[in-house]
Image (tube, rainbow, N blue to C red):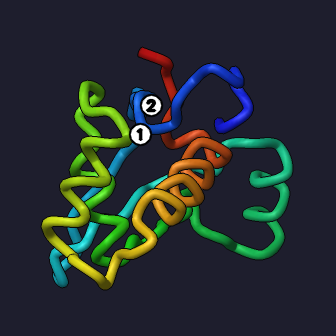
Amino acid sequence: MMKKNKNTNFLDMIPIKRDKLRTKITDEGRLQIIVPRKGLLDKIVRLFLKTPRTMKIDLDDIGTWVWNSIDNKRNMGQIGEILKKEFGDQIEPVYERLAIYMKTLENNKFIKIQKT
């Protein structure tokens, strides 16, 4: 994400949620990302170990706020400002943490990062 172009500013980049990604809100009010396990290896493992057809990833409070802040229009700088207002000093250093979190979401193919 950060190596897309040396002239690209991270704060100007826009995270885009992937289509067909299912989510739900847990009883605690946090977000859960539901990932289908459709690969050949997943099918083999499911056959022998009786694993579930989906993997459920529970986000914490900050992760839920980040996810809900992604509207496919806001850039990283705007999302960082939202986090600062909501979490204050608890989120610092906000942009470093946001960069790592967004890279994790991108690596897992939950979002893609787009230049403005």
116 shown above or below 88: above
Q: Quadrant of the C terminus?
A: top left
Q: Which mark is residue 105?
A: none
- Residue 20 visible to the viewer: no
Quadrant hosting residue 100: bottom right
Q: CA distance from mark 1 to mark 2?
A: 6 Å
Q: Secondary structure at mark 2?
A: loop
Q: Is residue 43 above or below residue 4?
A: below
Above or below residue 106? Residue 114 is above
Which residue is rendered at x = 48% and y = 67% of the image?
A: 57
Q: Residue furthest toward the front?
A: 7
Labelled disc at residue 18: 2
Crowd class of label 1 (few under 14; some 14 to 19; many from 20; radius 10 Å) = few
Instruction: Give the position of the N terminus as an image quadrant.
Output: top right
Determine contact: label 1, label 2, CB under 8 Å.
Answer: yes
Left or right of 103 on screen, residue 33 = left
Q: Which residue is mark 1?
A: 21
- Label 1 or label 2, whichever lies nearer to me, is 2
